[in-house]
Image (cartoon, rainbow, N blue to C red):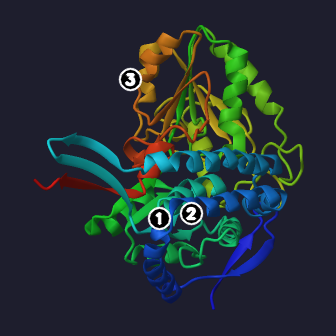
């Protein structure tokens, strides 16, 4: 049997070797899911909800253990691991509260003996190829509404968060979801490729643009449901009327939280020339106060880089920017010792000839560019192939609305950043992906609307 080695990114040490799936076991689990799904869909919604309520209780009961597992395998600071699990609970509550209405049959016309209805049927078997940076959030954004709406789930957690994926699966099984209806597939890219070969009815993926393209090509001919969340190069504009200290403190957290490894991390900042220098001063001061160290330590803010290959990407972006004239104010180097470490890095005098302002960093690296006003800011914010989130800091809501209405992004922020709500859809524009999760739309995404034409007999 093949195995998947799990290493601690903070130390490089081997944690465990997990039994891994292969093409045969993936096929077996997919066939079992297909057989089991109709019976799961036939169970009353109240029973499916009861299972998810049990899952929530398990998360609460085991929260500290689950946080420790996530920190060990991803390098996420322990406080942030706990934050993710605590933040999951209101998402679960949202799905439980909204699913009844979201998938209730809708009568859209009833006149002259003719009644028209829309019913929401489950897709069937859903493939979920998930991410490592927020494994509970990203995985459960798909798994929970998929199960609630009557689907079976074939879940492949990232190979960098497989232990957490197994914990998610364990808690669902303990709560009453059968192993056939909720199956975890352990392995790296070859297991994901084998999953795409199965007769699934929908594919939901969160990860890199390059992998998303390959998935789209693999399933495109089959005309099945496809959702891709592919990250971004998220911009924020700080207007001249903003408080430079408040904006700097908020955006430093938005850029560096989770060691910059968030899909909606602030990745480029444009600051009005009137307050640029004051903003940069406060930003650098704030970032200097972030402690980089052992992710298991309670006072650590900057943890390890989860994927070792990303260190090279960060090195190349910083070197490219310096070669083209950027100023390095802070960081710009790998951390010392074993493990995957990169110092929080702040650069100014940047422009769009530099990769740091164009290509996703996914690490604690930020470029800050001076702009003359709103028009230049809008032009630069839209000078990207991505479109996940964008933000504006200003005292004037109408000014923020005017700027953000012209920016191509799935989510926009006024005086905040790096924020996701279960009540709002999570979607992207351009190379940030297609489809959505979260909100009531993200519940209905796991259903197929069926149109009913019902004529009463004469």
Instruction: Give the spatial CA distance, label 3 vs label 1.
Output: 39 Å
Location of residue 177 by image quarter:
bottom right
Mark 3 or 2: in front is 2
Mark 2 surroundings within 10 Å by alpha-carbon count, few (fewer than 14), some (14 through 19), many (20 or more): many
Judging from the image, what secondary structure is the residue with disc 2 in? helix
Residue under the image location 62 percent in, 26 percent down: 416
Query: Left or right of 54: which side holds 199?
Result: left
Q: How many marks?
A: 3
Mark 3 or 1: in front is 1
Which of marks 1 and 3 precedes in the sequence?
Answer: 1
Residues tagged 3 and 1 counted as in contact (Cβ below 8 A): no
Residue 321 position within the rendered picture, expressed as x and y whole percent measured from the top left:
57, 37
Residue 375, relative to residue 254: is it above or below? above
Residue 302 position within the rendered picture, expressed as x and y whole percent measured from the top left:
78, 45
Identify the mark at residue 48; answer none if there is no mark: 2
Residue 276 position within the rendered picture, expressed as x and y whole percent measured from the top left:
63, 15
Instruction: Give the spatial CA distance, label 2 vs label 1.
Output: 8 Å
Residue 220 position within the rendered picture, expressed as x and y whole percent measured from the top left:
29, 64
Which of marks 2 and 3 precedes in the sequence?
Answer: 2
- Say which residue label 1 marks: 150
Which residue extends farthest bottom?
1
Query: Left or right of 112: which side holds 92?
Result: right
Mark 3 surroundings within 10 Å by alpha-carbon count, few (fewer than 14), some (14 through 19), many (20 or more): few
Q: Nearer the viewer, residue 136 or 73?
A: 136
- Say which residue label 3 marks: 406
Residues tagged 2 and 1 counted as in contact (Cβ below 8 A): yes
Identify the mark at residue 79; answer none if there is no mark: none
Which of marks 1 and 2 precedes in the sequence?
Answer: 2
Residue under the image location 82 percent in, 63 percent down: 11
Residue 32, relative to residue 338: is it above or below? below
Which residue extends farthest left?
458
């Amino acid at each position: 049997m093949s195995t998947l080695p799990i290493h601690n990114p903070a130390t490089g040490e081997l944690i465990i070797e997990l039994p891994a799936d292969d093409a045969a076991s993936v096929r077996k689990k997919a066939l079992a899911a297909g057989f089991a799904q109709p019976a799961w869909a036939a169970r009353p919604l109240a029973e499916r909800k009861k299972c998810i309520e049990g899952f929530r209780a398990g998360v609460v009961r085991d929260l500290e253990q689950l946080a420790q597992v996530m920190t060990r395998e991803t390098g996420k600071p322990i406080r942030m691991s706990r934050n993710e699990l605590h933040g999951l609970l209101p998402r679960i509550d949202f799905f439980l509260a909204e699913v009844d209405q979201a998938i209730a049959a809708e009568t859209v016309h009833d006149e002259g003996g003719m009644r028209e209805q829309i019913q929401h049927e489950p897709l069937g078997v859903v493939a979920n190829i998930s991410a490592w940076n927020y494994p509970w959030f990203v995985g459960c954004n798909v798994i929970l509404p998929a199960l609630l709406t009557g689907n079976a789930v074939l879940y492949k957690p990232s190979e960098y968060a497989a232990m957490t994926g197994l914990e998610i699966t364990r808690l669902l099984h303990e709560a009453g979801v059968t192993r056939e209806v909720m199956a975890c597939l352990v392995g790296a890219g070859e297991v994901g490729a084998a999953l795409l070969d199965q007769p699934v009815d929908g594919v939901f993926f969160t990860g890199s643009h390059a992998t998303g393209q390959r998935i789209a090509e693999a399933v495109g001919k089959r005309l099945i449901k496809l959702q891709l969340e592919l990250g971004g190069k998220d911009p924020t504009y700080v207007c001249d009327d903003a408080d430079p200290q408040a904006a700097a403190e908020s955006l430093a957290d938005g850029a560096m939280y989770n060691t910059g490894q968030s899909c909606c991390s602030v990745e480029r900042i444009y600051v009005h020339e009137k307050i640029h220098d004051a903003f940069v001063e406060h930003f650098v001061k704030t970032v200097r106060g972030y402690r980089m160290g052992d992710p298991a330590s309670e006072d650590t803010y900057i943890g390890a880089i989860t994927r070792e290959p990303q260190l090279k990407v960060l090195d190349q972006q910083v070197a490219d920017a310096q070669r083209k004239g950027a100023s390095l104010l802070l960081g710009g180097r790998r951390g010392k010792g074993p493990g995957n470490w990169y110092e929080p890095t702040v650069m100014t005098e940047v422009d769009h000839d530099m990769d740091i302002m164009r290509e996703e960093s996914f690490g604690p690296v930020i470029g800050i560019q001076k702009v003359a006003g709103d028009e230049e800011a809008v032009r630069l914010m839209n000078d990207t192939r991505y479109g996940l989130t964008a933000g504006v800091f200003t005292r004037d809501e109408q000014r923020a609305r005017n700027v953000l209405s012209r920016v191509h992004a799935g989510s926009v922020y006024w005086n905040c950043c790096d924020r996701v709500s279960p009540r709002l859809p999570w979607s992207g524009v351009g190379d940030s992906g297609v489809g959505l999760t979260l909100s009531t739309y993200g519940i209905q995404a796991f259903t197929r609307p069926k149109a009913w034409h019902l004529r009463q007999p004469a």
